[in-house]
Amino acid sequence: SQKIEQNSEALNIQEGKTATLTCNYTNYSPAYLQWYRQDPGRGPVFLLLIRENEKEKRKERLKVTFDTTLKQSLFHITASQPADSATYLCALGRTGTASKLTFGTGTRLQVTL
Amino acid sequence: GAVVSQHPSWVICKSGTSVKIECRSLDFQATTMFWYRQFPKQSLMLMATSNEGSKATYEQGVEKDKFLINHASLTLSTLTVTSAHPEDSSFYICSAPSSYTDTQYFGPGTRLTVL
């Protein structure tokens, strides 16, 4: 069965450092992978999308990589700030499925001063 | 950016009653909307795909007679939890896909508590 795992349930880092979150999947051939941010009691907010033929995408302090051989995506937040503290979800999708997404378990990031 | 709203944001009801949750796309049209359920410290689980003008498509294991979905217009989908029980208590979130990309716009969620 399909499985999407994110490296750890929680990640604590110091302000200014780079946070690296991992998303691994099995029994799935995604056409694209997305990262979302979710704050407590709120719906997810889209951050980045990377397609199967792309290796890396950047947006401001965010960077995502996608390795379809390793079946893994890495999500980096550079110069992290306390405001980056949230749960980050990876989600996989295929073309022709009307944008249907399968979500990972999420990683709760805590950035401390 | 596109905005999706949900109403109510939270609801408490007695066991056996029915609860309706609305999902609206405020500044764009959505022929498809998705309904998710999220239990504490767990990920989003897709319940069903709501299709404007036709029947919803339910994921395996989701009871269609218990979770009634109606997509009455291009901007409104409703989820009705019928004969709610305490185990239905959860965070229900809807989303609508972008017309131009493969991303989704999520509503703020509805916290349902069944006593």
Image (tube, rainbow, N blue to C red):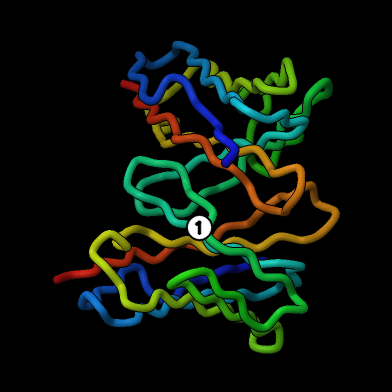
On screen, A67 above or below B79?
below
Q: Residue at x 70, y 88 (%)?
A: A69
Residue at the spot of label 1: A36
Q: Position of residue A15 (x, y in %)?
A: 22, 75
Q: Chain of mark 1?
A: A
B81 left or right, relative to B101 = left
* Residue B24 appears in view: yes
Q: Residue at x 52, y 20 (%)?
A: B21
Label 1 environment density (alpha carbons within 10 Å; few <14, some 14–19, many ≥20): many
Viewer-closest of A49 and B57: A49
Label 1's element? Answer: strand
B3 left or right, relative to A82 = right
Q: Position of residue B2 (x, y in %)?
A: 59, 38
- Looking at this view, name the residue that lies furthest to the top: B17
Q: Position of residue A54 (x, y in %)?
A: 72, 79
B113 left or right, relative to A54 = left
Q: Would you identify the image quadrant in which residue A34 lies?
A: bottom right
Q: Position of residue B101 (x, y in %)?
A: 73, 52
On screen, A88 above or below A41?
below
Viewer-closest of B77 and B47: B77
